[in-house]
Amino acid sequence: MTRTRIAVLASGGGTNLQAILDHFERLGDRRSGDVIVVASDRPGAGALARARARGIAAEVVAASADVDRVLDAHDIELVVLAGYLRHVPDPVVHRYAGHIVNVHPALLPAFGGPGLYGARVHDAVLAAGVAVTGVTVHFVDEEYDRGTIIAQWPVPVLTGDDGETLAARVLRVEHILYPRVVNAVAGGKITLAACQRGERPTAAGVEFTMLSREDDCLAEDIDRALGC
């Protein structure tokens, strides 16, 4: 079976990378892709260490041109952003249109855009006083956090939450939802064209038809992670 060749771009510790690798390992021969290379703009990023520990190529992309070089060198077919804080060069976005995805720790289009990443997102959510935040997985285009949405899942904001507790709760959902979406995109079960037609999973309580063929326990796993 030919699997999709995946590059993961990450700037930090790589916990979403780890979640993807662990999910692929659980799927075994049923996985639709393989992570071929992990690239980071930060030489000391934990994501690079995680890649090396798994025998996966680990590359530092110090300049925008380096991203294209790395993707070319490894014949990459799908680009996965996992906490990558740099703007992806437009030529890369154009080349991989429909084959580059990102995860955002809120329900886009709320709390997204330039400057809203990591702890800043959760601080903005708390400052707004909303009762629900969530996770969004989306295709990437030229604008920050404005690409076509693939999947969203709500996460409650609890009384007494601070940025740290809220971030931890959202991250638990990211670790369950994102790997499944990545595998579905890699396998062609989810496409940009279908999502643009509105054929996509949207929220809890709506059947995730494009993911259910892979994992019937998505909702149960997320409920368990949230302590429901």
Image: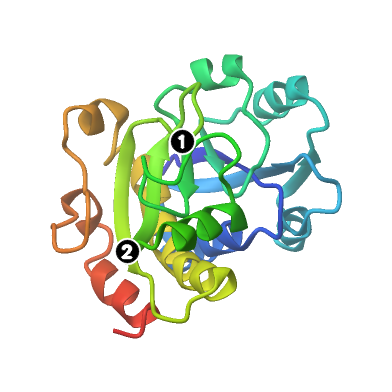
- Residue at 75% x, 63% y is 53
Res. 150 image quadrant: top left
- Residue at 35% x, 61% y is 130
Q: In screen coordinates, is 53 left or right of 165?
A: right
**10 Å neighbourhood of mark 1: few (<14), some, or many (≥20)?**
many
Q: Can residue 186 be seen in this view?
A: no
**10 Å neighbourhood of mark 2: few (<14), some, or many (≥20)?**
some
Q: Nearer the viewer, residue 75 or 195?
A: 195
Q: Which of 227 and 49 is in front in this view?
A: 227
* Residue wearing tag 2: 132
Q: What residue type is labelled 2?
A: Val
Gap in angstroms between the C-alphas marked 1 and 2 = 19 Å
Sequence-first tag of 1 and 2: 2
Q: In screen coordinates, is 212 left or right of 40?
A: left
Q: Where is residue 122 in the image (x, y as percent from the top left)?
A: 52, 60
- Label 1's element? loop
